[in-house]
Amino acid sequence: MSTTNGMSDRGKVAIVGSGLIGTCWAALFASAGYPVCLYDIGEEQLANSRKNVKNSLMKLEEDGLSRGSSTAEEALSRITSTTSLAEALQGAVYVQESTMESVEFKQKIFAEMDSLASPTTILASSTSTIPASSFTEGLKHRCRCLVVHPVNPPLYLTLTELVPAPWTEPSVVDRAYEIMQSIGQTPIRLQKEVLGFAVNRLQYALLAESWRLVKDGVLSVEDVDKVMSEGLGPRYAFYGPFGVVHLNAAGVRDYCTRYATGIRRVLADAGETPTFEEPEVIRELEDSLQKLLPVERMADHSAERAQKLAELAKLKRKLKMD
Ligand SMILES: NC(=O)c1ccc[n+]([C@@H]2O[C@H](COP(=O)([O-])OP(=O)(O)OC[C@H]3O[C@@H](n4cnc5c(N)ncnc54)[C@H](O)[C@@H]3O)[C@@H](O)[C@H]2O)c1
């Protein structure tokens, strides 16, 4: 698949499971010039998915966020669909499994894919939480399996975590990395499997402290969210925790010299890990969030969030080009 200039060829990609994430993957790969075959269990699901892929491609084009030089129509013409897994995998160089989040189900579908795919096909899973070692161990081609985890909505958030199992060949991770770059994603590579991968380890650390601040009566739910949306969040959109501390002093060494003792003192003051089941905290969170983002209108809120993230993606793309 690799060419001499290090870019990947546009070999066939199979998307196994065409729900929310599968359809985003299909749009991204097709937008970047890959022939894509969508697989799902029924024609009804596929008809719905094709509509969603079309909408995503048109939206990418409208926002100037296409991942290649093709029009939405051209990208759409690269997408086929099937209810036969064998047909989807036939000739595929890369498979992005995006079915249900259950270890038993991943074991079953990966066993099927392993028996049908060519020995050189990369088998990637979109799973958010299940390490590849728990569903690929007994497979003949387990060295070609890994987790390739996007962040929702992948059309506008480009981060993709690559998480190998202990037996994944490093060259397979290299290729998956290159393929993600070729579709405009921003891959990161975990050197070993850890629970929660990177995104959820960081997200949960923040959630735990947010929870404690509400539980201990320090901050209201609204004010915790403001700390992020009006303070830390915008900075993190451009610099991560390391870039931020480096810029907050005369470099990271100076930051650590000046603040290490204080950081340790604050962290030692943090309470225990919440259970995330404390009824009084859940009630407080619900009362507050329900006023702001009522669950009855969740689809509208998700669409609004996607639009805001699209605007941020446009800005980031513009800043990179300037
Ligand atoms: N939703 C998110 O925010 C998000 C983010 C990152 C990763 N993920 C991961 O992506 C994967 C898919 O999540 P989703 O939100 O798209 O789920 P989804 O429920 O929207 O889609 C799952 C799809 O799998 C299909 N399916 C069911 N049985 C199947 C079978 N036997 N063979 C093939 N397809 C089958 C369903 O018809 C459906 O189209 C999960 O592993 C999830 O953890 C989800």
Image: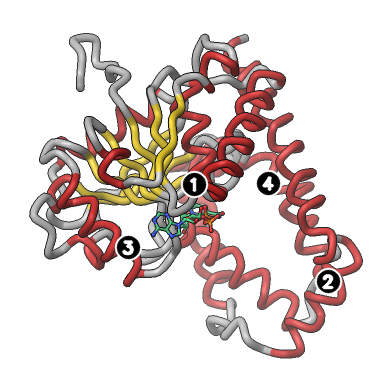
Determine which quarter of the picture holds residue 321.
top right
Q: Amino acid at mark 3?
A: Lys
Mark 2 residue element: loop
**Marks 3 and 1, how far apart at CA:** 15 Å
Horizontal and vertical percent position of residue 279: 72, 90
**Closer to the eye: label 1 or 2:** 1
Mark 3 residue element: helix
Residue at the spot 25% in from the left edge and 64% down from the top edge? 135
Crowding at mark 2 (Cα within 10 Å: few <14, some 14-19, many 20+):
some
Q: Are marks 2 and 3 in contact (CB under 8 Å)?
A: no
Crowding at mark 3 (Cα within 10 Å: few <14, some 14-19, many 20+):
many
**Marks 4 and 3, how far apart at CA:** 34 Å
**Marks 1 and 2, how far apart at CA:** 39 Å
**Closer to the eye: label 4 or 3:** 3
Horizontal and vertical percent position of residue 199: 47, 54
Horizontal and vertical percent position of residue 26: 48, 34
In the picture shown, does residue 308 fall above or below 274?
A: above
Quarter of the rendering occupied by the N terminus: top left
Say which mark, if any, is on residue 18.
1
Disc 3: which residue = 106
Mark 4 residue element: helix
Residue at the spot 44% in from the left edge and 64% down from the top edge? 101
Disc 2: which residue = 220
Camera-side residue: 6 or 40? Answer: 40
Determine which quarter of the picture holds residue 211.
bottom right
Residue at the spot 80% in from the left edge and 55% down from the top edge? 226
Q: Residue furthest right?
A: 291
In the picture shown, does residue 108 fall above or below 33?
A: below
